Amino acid sequence: VTEVVVTPTEQIQLFAAAGRELFESTLRQEGTEAAHLLDTVAAQIEGRAEELWPLAAEETGLAEGRLRGEIARTVGQMRGFAQAVRAGEGQDAIIDRADPDATPPRPDQRRANVPLGPVAVFAASNFPFAFGVAGGDTASAWAAGCPTVVKAHPGHPRLSRAIAATIEDGVAEAGADPAWFALVEGAGTETGSALAAAAPIAAVAFTGSLRGGTALARIGAERPEPIPVYAEMGSANPVFVTPAAALARGDEIAAGLAGAVTGHAGQLCTKPGVIVLRDDDAGRALVATLAEAIRATPAQRMLYPGLARSFAAGVAEAADDPRINRLADGPAATDEGEAQVAALLEIRADGLEHADPRLEEIFGPAAVIVWAADEEELTATAHDKVEGSLTGTVQAEAGDELGGRLLAALRPRVGRLIWNGFPTGVTVGHATVHGGPFPATTASMTTSVGITAMRRFLRPVGYQDVPDELLPPSLRDSNPLGLLRQVDGEWTRDPLVHA
Amino acid sequence: VTEVVVTPTEQIQLFAAAGRELFESTLRQEGTEAAHLLDTVAAQIEGRAEELWPLAAEETGLAEGRLRGEIARTVGQMRGFAQAVRAGEGQDAIIDRADPDATPPRPDQRRANVPLGPVAVFAASNFPFAFGVAGGDTASAWAAGCPTVVKAHPGHPRLSRAIAATIEDGVAEAGADPAWFALVEGAGTETGSALAAAAPIAAVAFTGSLRGGTALARIGAERPEPIPVYAEMGSANPVFVTPAAALARGDEIAAGLAGAVTGHAGQLCTKPGVIVLRDDDAGRALVATLAEAIRATPAQRMLYPGLARSFAAGVAEAADDPRINRLADGPAATDEGEAQVAALLEIRADGLEHADPRLEEIFGPAAVIVWAADEEELTATAHDKVEGSLTGTVQAEAGDELGGRLLAALRPRVGRLIWNGFPTGVTVGHATVHGGPFPATTASMTTSVGITAMRRFLRPVGYQDVPDELLPPSLRDSNPLGLLRQVDGEWTRDPLVHA
């Protein structure tokens, strides 16, 4: 195990201050180097894939195929952001022309987004590339024009340093200012607290535990100058199976659930942790098949020993709940420290409270079956018993009216609704929503994955009667960037013609 | 003086819970009643203008013309939001079509916004209509589809009740659920704290003091389920005058500043509180004219006695600063309790610290002149000495290169840049930005005025492979609302045609 280095607080302050200085100068220059930076760093990472994935495999225990796929996603999302920046996405250009005859007279008003300032990124343990040092938070902050100070996850320090070195080479190759990126390290909470509290930092992006995310959110709120903290945390990702779906596709659904619960040792933000069915023959048959698959799932290494310990403790605590029955376990592990046994628990819906803590995420290969007595109890569980979640899934049949009711009941509580699929697997695109009500995140108005993730780091600035040559290009009369703009309430790419 | 009623905490909880229940059912019905509600309430307020403005005049001391104008703005912004809702603004519909041949295969992903939940609105004292019980926060929350529980400002309790009764009549006339609106009252901090802490509340909108806004932001962050707090607070609204502008238009600028500093007894969020000039003949002549106007400004009644007291204390505290010279005062007031004397103070730029507290807002008819030795010190003051502000103004001449430098230096610190105007007067439109970095607000990513203010109360929900008939209308293949949507990255109003 490589020892984790602790970056001194003074150094963290210096990194943040350098980011602030760059931010102020870049903003004044209408900096457009972000797209070039993203493309150059993407190519650097792609070029070193053969060197990076084995390091990741060694430090995280994740498999080659998964890691190669993750590198492709990481590189792909950087290029997607670069393309979006070039297309002017995130500019949000709106123009209201002057009306001197109105009462009172209306000035010329325009608005477009500017970057928020230097962003502190907290890399996650479970996606060492896609949510890591060069992950979506770093890429979307850059896309918004924000320099980043990134805290490495202590679970994979050598990989973090190798990615940081790759980024630094990319920054140099792109001819960009070195202050676009800095890496800080630390194993306890001190480094992260110092980073989130550093005065030049304008926003925090975090992926990790509920405890870590809420602690950072408080630091953000209690600073002399409060800043937004975008934390993506725990999520139970409930899956509801209608009686008709259990009857028609029980085995298929059981197989899909088994893969989603145990794949990557259940170490995904969107692992289905709660599965709700009606207690009838088809439901029991589905769960029997799922339990069999769990019993056949070999013990898996988890990302780092601390995670394996907290998973085992979480399962044990749940099993201690008198309402819970421990239904199935995987075969005994050979390595107590890091290898983990999959687990399936069960509970009756009529014993559940509002937002019941027993349905909270257990991070790792475990799920809780919730038995509903009837369709009404299925819907009531969706409506009242589950907490805010990244995803909510409904397995239903065509014309299955209950499916629509379940979707509607879940919608106020989740970021993404999934129909006849499984919540694992996040597709990076324009329409991606990887967010949701607390405790899934601290900011349900945002997504941490997909092109619109960059909106987290932008804010609007209004320009009143500012001469054309002093406006940013996005707002000039001639529309030199060819943007789609809202002009007097109508959307157009046309240049402005003054009456 | 009418005694302020204190709404019991149990009643606040009941109002919030009713809002939550309505929100859940409305969301499930794809409620479109918000536009009708806004129009109906607007007509009700318009119809009772003759009854409402005299009540406002009595309780606030504001003049008839100003209050009539404010009622027109309040009604106008409700209608503007209704129109925006009907046009589908705020839906933010984005569609990424499925690609089964991609690696990994891409599902059909769509996203559109849903309301956040019941909103707690804190009405302001200084705009009893436009930022009051029926003000922009209430209207924009409704436009987003969110029920509101509104805390009246204790400065005008009878007007608040009359507006609430008008709204309730409008809600009934529109056939809407009564839970769209509830009024709560209280003079201390207890009512507001209980409202912001009430579990069913999903967001807070506040306009008022820095102390009040930051206290609410902490309550929002420290709840078991944290919620966003959109507080619009204090703002110094610095005005920079270039030497060329002082030379060319000194008297005109002085007259404009005098009106902006003393109009409405300086009780505007955008009152210019800091005026920065070069210490030269033209600058001194401008300030001499301004000082003369201040000395000629009769004492004015402030909104309520507590405000008059805190204004006097703020001026006295500033004048006690050894760096400050008290330059001019208005003629003595006749009514110590409520009438206030305008005040002009001066300080040298070279004595200022980073974000100097001496440049903080003094709410009322006062401003601080900052004398810069040269152009460099003018720019440095914009860059480093002023805090986050709702507005930043530059008075400059055509071809005056310093003007552009000042705009650029101010931009990271303000919500709205104004060229050769004055910051007072906020035009409600699509491009409006009434926000800015802390301490101007707690959420610089948002505006509290203008059509995009409704975005504060919306969040995205993703739909993965959801059948067309279960999608919200904004996302259906046929595009029944005729929205401009981003489909596979391109903007179009066309219906979706499956390959």
Image (cartoon, coloured by chain):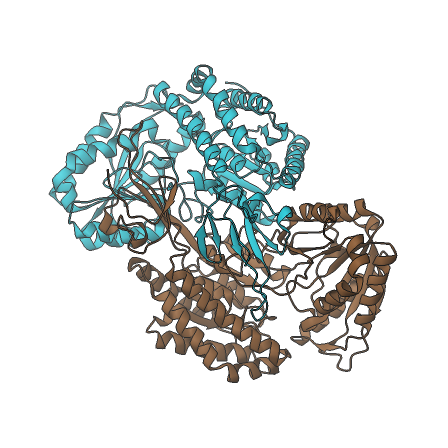
Chain colours: A brown, B cyan
**Is B347 above or below relative to B127?**
below
Depth order, front residue of B102/A331: B102
**Is B107 above or below relative to A41?**
above
Q: Identify the image quadrant of the N terminus of chain A.
A: bottom right
Farthest residue in the right direction?
A281
Residue at 55%, 33% in the rendered image: B34
Q: Identify the image quadrant of the C terminus of chain A.
A: top left
Residue A145 in sight in this render? no
Residue at 76%, 79% in the rendered image: A336
Image side of residue B411 versus residue A499, left or right? right
Image side of residue A94 versus residue A210, left or right? left
- State which quadrant residue B3 falls in: top right
Residue A338 in sight in this render? yes
Depth order, front residue of A146/B495: B495
Depth order, front residue of A192/B140: B140
Q: Position of residue B109 (x, y in %)?
A: 57, 57
**Is B296 above or below relative to A98?**
above
Q: Position of residue A441 (x, y in %)?
A: 59, 55
**Is A394 above or below relative to B10?**
below
Q: Position of residue A73 (x, y in %)?
A: 53, 70
Q: Position of residue B97 (x, y in %)?
A: 54, 58
